[in-house]
Image: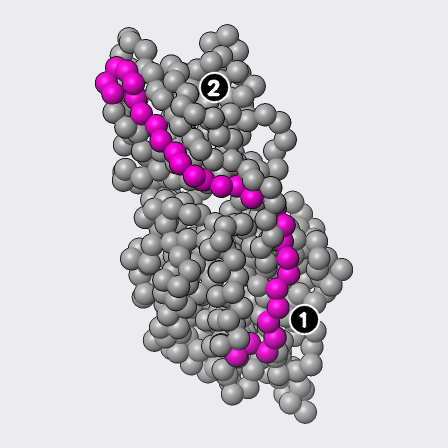
Amino acid sequence: MKRIFVTLTLILVSLLTGCQTGLHRKTASDDVVEQLQQLALSSDLAWQILASLTSEVGPRMGGSESDGRAVIWAVDKMHSMGFDRVWTEPVTFPRWVRNNESAEVLAPAAQRLMVTALGGSPSTGGPIDAEVIQFDSLEDLQAASIEDVTGKIVFLSTRMRKSREGSGYGETVVNRSRGPFEAAKKGASALLIRSVGTDRDRLPHTGMMSGSEPGPRVPSAAMSNPDADNLMIMLSREEPVNVRLNLDVGFEGEATSYNVIGEFDGSEDLTERFLLGAHLDSWDLGTGAVDDGAGVAIVLATAKLISNLSVRPRYGTRVVLYANEEQGIYGGKAYAKLHQLNMHDHLIGAESDLGADRIYGFKTRVLPQAEATIENLARHLKRLGIKREDTEPAGGGADVGQMRKLGMAVIDLNQDASLYFDLHHTANDTLAKVNPEFLRQNLAAWVTLVYLTTSGSGTFGPVEPSD
Ligand SMILES: [Zn+2]
């Protein structure tokens, strides 16, 4: 009987949301959503989880000792939050270590450069002294002659553009991902890039070169924006610029970490669940509060608030805290490989991994028959200042997106990324940069999304598999 009532309510909601919003009659589901939003907007749960992670674990680079502690933290946290079941799945990858790193200008004016090695970089095997050759872009390096570049330290000076969508990242990150390989092809001795970041702090931004890329690579580091500016001025004069680079870093065997998974059941005995994701690992320079501690806190708190409802939604929720996203999406890929045969157990998926700022928009990749639910979602998210933006289909994020590639339906809640790349992958990624009010707005949006999608008829996918 209850099921029939729910179905009828949903048809009613569909019919009404199909009309102008002014004609919408309030349903029981609307009341629950509004209560959930109020609860989220006054909840410190996400903040408490984040503060716990950054203070009890801190930086947690994939394969490090602290990464192991992060896994234990996550399992304990899920147990203490009352998840119905908690387990881990192993994820194995090459272990990369950072021991020491430094760089200095030798001529024309001796001074230190603030640098950090790029993940995946080999060691310089002691200091390398060489002349710097600068290029405005990766294409310019690719067009250069081997003769001009051989033996030199290549400097890629491209500056990242700031935008709300964070689209400047994709344009510039090729210097980091491809640069080390292109510099090797030209016979360079090493690579320095201007950090892929939008700040003016004297802090370099680390990040991975293309981990899966085969072929030779040169020792590579990123320098802070102010150091890159200073170097550009030196290079604008006639005399050669010589730099010493010393990177004691590199791969050391293999490491095994874990995807940490927790589930809350729904009110009905249904196998499909909402796949809610964030990555547990971080880079080693900051405490990984923003990338992606905030995401971890948001998805855990979301699942908890939904599970606390006196009547849970029909479908359950599965939270996956992915292992080693930073060095090559290892956790997301391992999860997709292991769970591809039970694709149909995934109702829909979404991931939080673009910082801790306000959510301003959302995108979908769902079947057309989900339209009524999506319109209802749009109506409720509008209250939080979030607009539907279906200019292009949702991607699902780095980790959860691995399941989208196999046909799982996904939704993106887009955070304002204007300031994210000021501190992304730097020592500045700490709890102090997280605004508790923004975290609560995120939580309110996420509970809205998960509640409305798990309490409906459940038809979101499969969608067309895509890369
Ligand atoms: Zn991240």
Among the two numbered marks 1 and 2 on one chain, the one whose residue lies closer to the N terminus: 2
Classify mark 2: residues with Cα within 10 Å, few (<14), some (14-19) or many (20+). many
The residue at the point 51 percent across, 21 percent down is: 183
Give the image location of residue 389, x and y in percent.
Answer: 49, 55
Q: What residue did someone put label 1 on?
A: 272
- Residue 450 appears anywhere in the view: yes
**The quarter of the displayed image where residue 272 is located:** bottom right
Q: Secondary structure at mark 1?
A: loop
Give the image location of residue 176, x and y in percent.
Answer: 47, 33
User: Can you tell which mark lies on residue 262?
Assistant: none
Above or below 132: residue 380: below
Quarter of the image that includes the N terminus: bottom right
Task: State whether the magenta stretch is mostly helix, strand or loop.
Answer: strand
Residue type at tag 1 = Glu
Q: Are marks 1 and 2 in contact (CB under 8 Å)?
A: no
Q: What residue did someone put label 2 on?
A: 189
Residue type at tag 2 = Ser
Quarter of the image that includes the C terminus: top right
Please state if 64 lies on the left or on the right of 205 as rendered: right
The residue at the point 59 percent across, 25 percent down is: 216
**In the image, the residue with mark 2 has its CB under 8 Å from the nearest atom of ligand 1:** no
Residue 97 lies in the magenta stretch: yes
Residue 317 lies in the magenta stretch: no
Classify mark 1: residues with Cα within 10 Å, few (<14), some (14-19) or many (20+). many
Give the image location of residue 298, x and y in percent.
Answer: 45, 65
Residues in magenta, as a range: 82-110
- Marks 1 and 2: which is nearer the front? 2
Above or below 259: residue 137: above
Between residues 422 and 126, which one lies in front from this camera angle? 126
Give the image location of residue 194, x and y in percent.
Answer: 37, 30
